[in-house]
């Protein structure tokens, strides 16, 4: 047995023991840990910044893309946001122990309850975002789960600094530090060990990263997976869309932060408003340094438009690039979204209620929006405190994965001496 294999099995065993303790921990104790962790994050601001500076320098030396570095980089505001998100999770209602339903069948008189319970041990595999260390640890903790985190090698220093703060919070509340652990090697073989389930100790895997990572997890995992695939997000500009609103939303959805999965990658514009809406949208996006890739008509209207290829309609750029296509109507827009998208987040800008209703009913995505930026596809913005990721599958969890999605349920049945005839 290799040293890495032994190390990974040990992580799983430690997490399993911690999960047993967390499953019966009170809401107050879990909240104390989160608040203490937030305090530690603020107290260790210089340490976290110094660690992140090392990661960013290494990324530059390795010629990593600007979008990747944006996801990796921490500053005082982003670190404060991490601390604030921990406090927000502490304020959330504790899902553990909630009675989802209760009934008594006439034929046997049994009292049956469906009760929320933790999942157990959750393995989270992510890439460049060091804030996931805190978000995932906090959400799993609040839902009574232990966590094994495997961050990317590019963020190892930042993630370790944040992990230390999370474990400080656990200690302060008297909880086992094994409740939140991180794989402390950059050896990619560690991911393969996690995907085996570590001897039955991991109950769920959550991948959060690029297409290749998620594809590998889906292919190799021997435990259930909450899939977070690409964010090929669309905005359809309907014929009744208000021009100013359309311009503002498209600009924000693409350029507020290009490196997040909720960033818009394709605009679909109704042909009935191509003469009024298209050029102002193009000019606004280009004023922000965005490259436009368009179909033939889009190329004929704007300046410096790159011809769109078939690949552009299925590409998550995560950069200052967007593809624009003219469509005949809401039906063609829906068909494009369902066939070219990743079922993450898609929006319609419209003042026609029938078109909005059709878009909502027929677009097969985890999140559908009306007259709002796709950048709101975020658990924090949904009032969930934070998220581990946006699940694009359909089983168990879909959309932002927060505390409720990190629980399962069991049936609690009480009788008065019944025996089955």
Image (cartoon, helix red, strand yellow):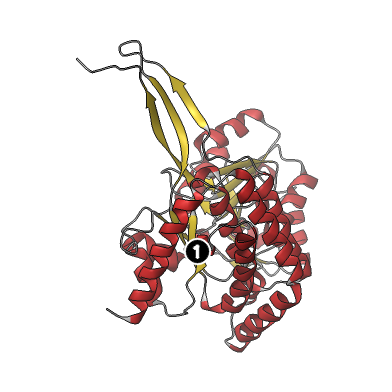
Q: Position of residue 15 (x, y in %)?
A: 44, 61
Residue at point 35%, 69% (across, down): 9
Q: Quadrant of residue 251?
A: bottom right
Q: Is residue 342 visible?
A: no
State the residue lying farthest toward the top: 106
Between 86 and 152, which is closer to the camera in this rendering? Answer: 86
| Nearer-the-camera pick, 316 or 351 | 316
Q: Name which residue lies at 60% across and 56% down.
A: 138
Query: How far across and how far down the image is residue 4, in percent?
Result: 36, 78
**What secondary structure is marked by label 1?**
helix
- The residue that mark 1 highlights is 178
- Label 1 Cα crowd, 10 Å radius (few <14 / some 14-19 / many 20+): many
Q: Is residue 224 above or below residue 111?
A: below
View extreme (bottom): residue = 61
Q: Quadrant of the C terminus?
A: top left
**Height in image: 211 above or below 279?**
below
């Amino acid at each position: 047995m290799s040293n890495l294999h032994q190390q990974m099995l040990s992580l799983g065993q430690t997490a399993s023991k911690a999960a047993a303790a967390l499953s019966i921990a009170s809401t107050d104790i879990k909240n104390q840990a989160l608040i203490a962790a937030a305090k530690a994050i603020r107290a260790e601001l210089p340490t976290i910044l110094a660690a992140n500076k090392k990661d960013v320098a290494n990324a530059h030396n390795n010629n990593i893309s600007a979008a990747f570095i944006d996801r990796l980089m921490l500053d005082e505001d982003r670190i404060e946001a991490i601390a604030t998100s921990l406090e927000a999770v502490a304020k959330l209602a504790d899902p553990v122990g909630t009675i989802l339903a209760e009934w008594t069948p006439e034929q046997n008189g049994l009292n049956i309850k469906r009760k929320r319970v933790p999942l157990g041990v959750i393995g989270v595999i992510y890439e460049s975002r060091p804030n996931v260390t805190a978000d995932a640890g906090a959400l799993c903790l609040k839902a009574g789960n232990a966590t094994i985190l495997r961050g990317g090698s590019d963020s190892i220093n930042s993630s370790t600094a944040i992990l230390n703060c999370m474990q400080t919070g656990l200690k302060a509340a008297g909880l086992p530090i094994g409740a939140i652990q991180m794989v402390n090697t950059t050896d990619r073989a560690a991911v393969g060990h996690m995907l085996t389930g570590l001897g039955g100790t991991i109950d769920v895997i959550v991948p959060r990263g690029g297409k290749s990572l998620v594809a590998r997890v889906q292919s190799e995992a021997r435990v259930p997976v909450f899939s977070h695939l690409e964010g090929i997000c669309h905005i359809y500009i309907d014929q009744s869309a208000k021009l100013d609103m359309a311009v503002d939303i498209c600009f924000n959805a693409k350029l507020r932060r290009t490196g997040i999965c909720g960033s818009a990658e394709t605009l679909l514009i109704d042909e009935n408003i191509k003469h009024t809406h298209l050029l102002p949208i193009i000019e606004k996006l280009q004023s922000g340094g965005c490259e436009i890739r368009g179909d033939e008509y889009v190329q004929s209207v704007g300046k410096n438009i790159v011809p769109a290829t078939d690949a552009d309609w299925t590409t998550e750029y995560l950069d200052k690039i967007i593809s624009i296509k003219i469509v005949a109507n809401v039906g063609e827009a829906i068909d494009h979204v369902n066939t070219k998208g990743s079922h993450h987040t898609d929006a319609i800008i419209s003042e026609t209620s029938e078109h909005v209703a059709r878009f909502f009913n027929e677009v097969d995505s985890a999140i559908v929006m009306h007259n709002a930026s796709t950048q709101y596809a975020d658990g924090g913005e949904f009032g969930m405190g934070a998220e581990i990721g946006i699940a694009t599958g359909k089983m168990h969890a879909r959309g932002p994965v927060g505390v409720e999605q990190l629980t399962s349920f069991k049936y609690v049945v009480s009788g008065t001496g019944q025996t089955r005839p």
